Amino acid sequence: MKSRLHLLLALSVVTAAQAQLPAGSSISFAPGAAANTSRVTIIDPGDHVWTLQSSPDLVNWTNVQNYKVHNGRLDCTTAHAPSTTNLFYRTSYSAALQGSITSTLATAVNLPVSPYDYDNPTLPANFAVPPISNQSNMPATNITTDAGAKLGRILFYDKRLSLNQTVSCSSCHQQAHGFSDPDRFSKGFEGGRTDRNSMGLSNARWYQRQSFFWDERSATLEIQVLQPIQNAVEMGMTLPALEARLGAEPFYVDLFTQVFGTPGVTSDRISKALAQFVRSIISVSSRFDAARTTNFVVGTNWTQSEERGRQLFNAPGNCSACHRTDNFVPDVDIFNNGLEFPYVDLGKGGVTGQAGDNGKFKVGSLRNIELTAPYMHDGRFATLEQVVDFYSTQVVDNPNLSPPLRLPPQQGGGVRRPNFTAQQKADLVNFMKSLTDTSLATNPKYSDPFNYGY
Ligand code: HEC
Ligand code: HEC
């Protein structure tokens, strides 16, 4: 009687021509989800061509297929005849094979037949009028187009933007987490940690002061998006090296031609496309947005608690003094919210050198705030409950504490501590959670486009 064993071998073979496997690569095999299938996973930051082979006896090997890895990872499933008794798989790397398969747009990325709409999103009517229309930071020199944001999306997910091809923008700005990072400090290309918490990117298009980063050190989004690429902890690249690397990939040359009319892969164009994609990350489909269209009438789609939270949020001197408009961003000011004194991180003051700016920080939109934990520039609070506890009783007096968090002079001018009740705290948290837009967290038009499987 024949045994029905299907053996899988985690065996990688190096040909004589190549003394070692490509840097950082590894291979694993596992039984597939369906009967008579096997799963092969290759991790390879260098995106090489690999050969998968099978053998009944570990002596005679047959080529199954050659594969090109895209963006560092390949998952493939192979099927074999049900009657197979013993079957071994191995995958091999041969220097001679490199170049035998080149990436094309069709093989490297999964794009929809008709392009996603990035340039004409359906927005609530009040986005077209002040104050929100004044918040838009889209410059006349870089109006978002569908083709430009599509290129920006591919760049945003491409690990080639980092020196050793292990980290992309999306490593620290994850769609499921409101384009932020659940880690307090993000891990860069060599494992080093950033010194601040990653920022969520929902509705970054609307920030009237235009500037980006917690300390507003980049005057525009176009300037900002090139910073992480060159940051020694984050991605460690130089712009000339990136231009050369992407310029050597034929499908990028095609894409740059589609967007800009000529084939040049320049850092100015990389910046424009990335900024277009970031500005296209728009959240207007939360419970809050739905309730807004019916004037927040409490009912099936808007709870008592959410409504109490909304009123508390907007009460004079409370949260909306700084988190303003339906984008929940400050407008003409940058604030200090009394996290600490003395200042551990000077924030804006570290950029301007002005004592009056010490401890002041940009705060991005509170949209999808439920998804972007932990909170504040140093990620000190793990939950929204902790944030509300902080504003309730823990705000620290300091020379730059912004006026909304201070009592009026006739009441002594000390720190304003609202001492919220347990119910009020829960209401504020429920209101902030009504800003969660699950469609943004899952919408394929913002997802990783790379093709990791066959
Ligand atoms: C290693 C992690 C990491 C990588 C990679 C990374 N970021 Fe960030 N990002 C951060 C951190 C941390 C901050 C806040 C840093 C600060 O303010 O000092 C930030 C801030 C930002 C901001 C500012 C948002 C605002 O409202 O001011 C934008 C936009 C942004 N990143 C986009 C990108 C893009 C585009 C890429 C890829 C080119 C990228 N990031 C790569 C961690 C990362
Ligand atoms: C004086 C202006 C001001 C007021 C009033 C204010 N905030 Fe803030 N808020 C800020 C600033 C500035 C930050 C960013 C501080 C930092 O990280 O250093 C912030 C950060 C936050 C964050 C974290 C954002 C993130 O991306 O990590 C949440 C949540 C928040 N505030 C909610 C509230 C709530 C709720 C209230 C009312 C109880 C409130 N804020 C009142 C200015 C203010």
Image (spheres, rainbow, N blue to C red):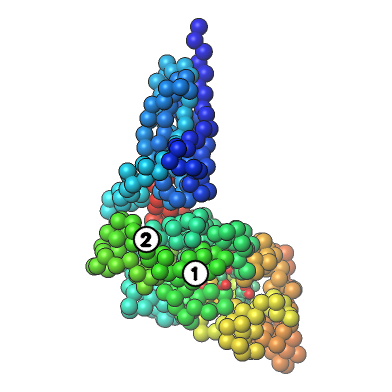
Read off the residue under disc 1.
230
Q: Position of residue 285 (x, y in %)?
A: 44, 61
Q: Position of residue 235 (x, y in %)?
A: 51, 63
Residue found at the very far bottom of the displayed protein: 410
Q: Is residue 359 among the parts visible in the rendering?
A: yes
Q: Is residue 121 among the parts visible in the rendering?
A: no
Mark 1 beta carbon near ligand 1 (under 8 Å) = no
Number of numbered discs visible in the structure rendering: 2
User: For the point 60% across and 66% down, which residue is it?
Assistant: 194
For the residue marked with disc 2, what is the amino acid?
Leu
Q: CA distance from mark 2 to mark 1?
A: 15 Å
Residue found at the very far top of the displayed protein: 1
Q: Is residue 439 left or right of residue 385?
A: left
Look at the image and tell me in which quarter the C terminus lies. top left
Residue found at the very far left of the displayed protein: 261
Read off the residue under disc 2.
246
